[in-house]
Image (cartoon, helix red, strand yellow):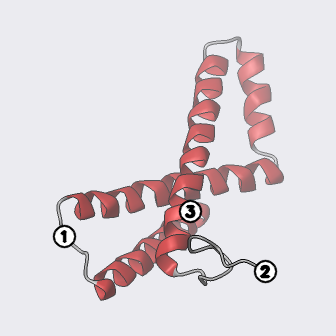
Amino acid sequence: MQKPLSPHLQIYSPQLTSILSILHRLTGLGFVIALIVTCVWLHVLSEVEVVYYNFCTWLNQPLIKVFLYLILACVYYHLLNGIRYLMWSLGKGFALHTVYNSGWVVCALVFTLIVMTVFLV
């Protein structure tokens, strides 16, 4: 068996930094879905009142609500982690303990915001 030419996923164990980086990219897709849902909602808003009522009824189904909360979690995470990346662009927060602490802070804030959204809306 030949050795791999470069480091591979089988060699490295997942770390918080790599997981958060991959999650940032995936939540970018969630952000796109949120924009599409918003555009559909705006289009339906310009239609007849019955169409808007039917769309709102569809949005109030439990499974759709869970999906919308997941999309909102993607938006929250992408926004907060984007602020974290902007701080890195300014050259701040590169110490290893700061990178991990800021990652955990982003995760805690996303969790807090989602819980607040679910229970306050």
Q: Amino acid at mark 3?
A: Leu
Q: Is residue 101 above or below residue 116?
A: below
Q: Which residue is mark 2?
A: 1
Residue count near mark 3 (Cα–Cα under 10 Å), binned few <14, some 14–19, many ≥20: some
Q: Is residue 46 above or below residue 34?
A: above
Q: Earlier in the sequence, mark 1 or mark 2?
A: 2
Q: Quadrant of the N terminus?
A: bottom right
Distance between mark 2 and mark 3 Cα atoms: 33 Å
Q: Which percent across, then down, holds residue 103?
A: 41, 76
Residue shown at 57% from the left, 74% from the top:
7
SS of the residue at dot 3? helix
Q: Is residue 37 above or below residue 74?
A: above
Q: Is residue 28 left or right of residue 68?
A: left
Q: Amino acid at mark 1?
A: Lys
Q: Which residue is mark 1?
A: 92
SS of the residue at dot 2? loop
